[in-house]
Image (tube, helix red, strand yellow):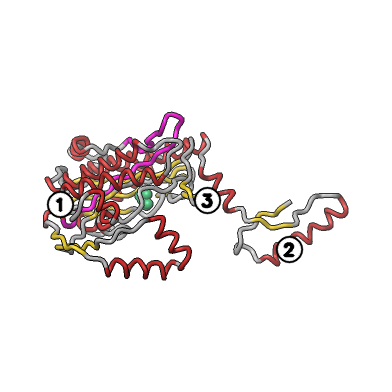
Amino acid sequence: DAVFVRPGSTPESDVRKALDGLGFFNERFGYPVPSTMTDPTPMIADMRLRKSADEAKELRRACEVSAEGHREAMRVARPGLYEYQVQAAMEYVYRMRGSMRDGYPAIVAGGDNACILHYNENDQILNDGDLLLIDAAAEIGQYSSDITRTFPVNGTFTAPQRAIYEIVLAAQHASFEVAAPGSTIKAVHDASARVLTEGLVDLGLLPRSVEESLAMHHYREYFMHGTSHWLGLDVHDAGPQWKNRSPVLLEVGMSFTVEPGLYVDPNRDSVEFSLYESDTDEAVARRLEMGTAAAKAFDDEAKAKAESVSLEIPEEFRGIGVRIEDDLLMTAGGYENMSAGVPTAIDEIEALCAEPPLTSAL
Ligand code: GLY
Ligand code: MN
Ligand code: MN
């Protein structure tokens, strides 16, 4: 006998007034009238976590259409075009395939712009020898896809670009391997973090061993966002990743992104790494006890006090930003990669880049 009202959405007095107005129907005709107010948000968020077969169909279609747009971007991009012109070619594909709008503002980031995580200007010229990072997707029936691909503007990866790219791709594959019902988003993230760290240590971009780099979170210098978020009606869909201090267990019908990345700051020739080990669980507990600001100050101070090492960043890597993002749906057997319609393997990307665009008459 509750009425569902999201706190803050309607003044409580208005809800009371509406309920009072219904009192007549209760007294006269015995209609049940709710007497309590309940916040529906957690219940709806929980429902949104698991996609029905019909929802999965829309999501899958959004992914197919988005993948087709990404394939066209690889064909269209060339030195001298502007970022927004590649965006236009993708959006033409989306619209012609029945998508009325994008799932979120497109990120079409040439060269150094790839290192700006929420770059949306899309107004720069594409340069020969640069990479192009595109995070863009179509929406179908209100469901959004979320795909990122990174490829060379001129169609051929350079050696340093290839080195970084291969690490990110290996990280994504490692995350795929632990993506299954019963696993967690945290496990998916940890798999990527480990492989990214191994690759960074191999390239000389981290000062310590793999285990120390993980314990000191050094990889965050190059990978400063999460690996996954729920996907659905919203590109960052509703629903918790943690419940009762434990990561939510993945179930059939849940959909999320897997999007490892590496971003090497174009403007820094060296990086200072603090040799400060911090336990993530303890950091969270501190935040709860001290409040976010005080806990951050605590961490910053501990970091500043700790010894640090400075590492030179080879020029060839500066300004390289790579993210590879796909959309998974949990199935009984593991996962379905709904966005596999656009390749991630280097040879397949280079082959697509060499194809003539569908929109070649322009
Ligand atoms: N496109 C937003 C995200 O990847 O989270
Ligand atoms: Mn995403
Ligand atoms: Mn994205």
Circle 2 residues within 10 Å: few <14, some 14–19, many ≥20: some
Residue tagged 3 = 244
Q: In the image as oriented, which residue stretches furthest toward the right? A: 28
- Picture coordinates of residue 194, whole percent (x, y): 28, 46
Residue at horizontal 75 percent and vertical 57 percent from the top: 35
How far apart marks 3 and 2 lie (CA) works out to 32 Å
Please identify, in this view, whether the residue under mark 1 or under mark 2 is nearer the observer.
1
Q: Counting residues from the N terminus, which is met first, the one under dot 1 or under dot 3? A: 1
Q: Nearer the viewer, residue 332 or 86?
A: 332
Residue type at mark 1: give it: Gly
Q: Is residue 68 placed above or below 332 in the rendered structure?
A: below
Q: Counting residues from the N terminus, which is met first, the one under dot 3 or under dot 2? A: 2
Describe residue 135's horizontal placement relative to residue 62 as left or right: left
How far apart marks 1 and 2 lie (CA) works out to 65 Å
Residue at horizontal 44 percent and vertical 40 percent from the top: 59
Image: magenta residue range: 318-341
Residue tagged 2 = 16
Badge 2 marks a residue whose secondary structure is helix
Circle 3 residues within 10 Å: few <14, some 14–19, many ≥20: few
How far apart marks 1 and 3 lie (CA) works out to 39 Å
